[in-house]
Image (cartoon, helix red, strand yellow):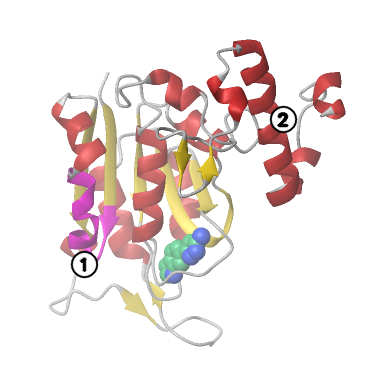
Amino acid sequence: MTFRIDVLTIFPEYLAPLGQSLLGKAAAKGLVSVGVHDLRQWTDDVHRTVDDSPYGGGPGMVMRPEPWGRGLEAVRPPGTRLVVPTPAGRPFTQAVAAQWATEPGLVFACGRYEGIDQRVADWAAEGGPVSEVSIGDYVLAGGESAVLVMVEAVTRLLPGVVGNAESVEFDSHADGLLEGPSYTRPATWRGHEVPPVLLSGDHAAIARWRRAQSLRRTADRRPDLLTGLPDGALTAADRAA
Ligand SMILES: Nc1cc(-c2ccc3cc[nH]c3c2)n[nH]1
């Protein structure tokens, strides 16, 4: 089943990387198909205007609803989730990416200026799910970078896209924790040793060590993830570690 992605933007060239590397191979395999659409094709004036002054005053410009309405009517398959990147959105997380990867596809609306007239998202919700999401607590100049991030996070979860399915299964955040450190040859490098347990061949000890490293790193770098874990996620051995 081909996962369909459509992106509406006033900077279509910004989304060119969507055809490269991981996504490129997936597209070549027919697992993903991507359409990038210039919003200005749905403007109705000779200047192809997409923005206007904000009602109520305030700095900057707001994206007009009409081009978005026409563009979404032309591009969005009925019932397909519309994703609107915004600093004011709900957090985009690995769990959200995993959920979206089970759907038939996504449509992304890339804002610029101070954002898109709110009525676009409100109207779009009449035709399917709408997710206003943030990729982090920092402010970008537009939604395009966020779309590149989210498309990569979602498409790598599609069956067949990442060669080694296990590497997806053991991602950071897959079990709610950060993944621990990784090592490869040489065993000693510039005076730094690989932890001996990893060379021991004792797979039970290696699994225990890796779990302990993951918990330690999570407690050190992202204690917030520990408070959000479901009951029973941490074993007695975890707590003793
Ligand atoms: N997480 C995050 C999203 C954004 C974002 C998304 C869309 C627009 C449109 C104009 N500025 C924008 C910023 N910044 N940070």
Between label 2 and label 1, give the one nearer the viewer. 2
Magenta range is 8-19
| Residue 36 vertical position relative to residue 53 in the rendered view, above or below | above
Residue of label 2: 212
For residue 140, above or below residue 166: below
Q: Position of residue 161 (x, y in %)?
A: 30, 26
Residue 61: image x %, image y %? 41, 81
Residue at image coords 44%, 85%: 60
Q: Is residue 195 magenta?
A: no
Alpha carbons under labels 2 and 1: distance apart: 56 Å
Kindly tell me whether residue 28 is visible in this rendering. Answer: yes
Image-based side of 156 in relation to 128, left or right: left
Count of all numbered marks drawn on residues in the image: 2
182 displayed left or right of 240: left
* Above or below 203: residue 11: below
Q: At x 61% / y 12%, what residue is drawn? A: 202
- The numbered disc on residue 13 is none
Could one spot residue 116 in this view of the protein?
no
First reached walking from the N terminus: tag 2 or tag 1: 1
Secondary structure type for disc 2: helix
* Residue with the mark numbered 1: 43
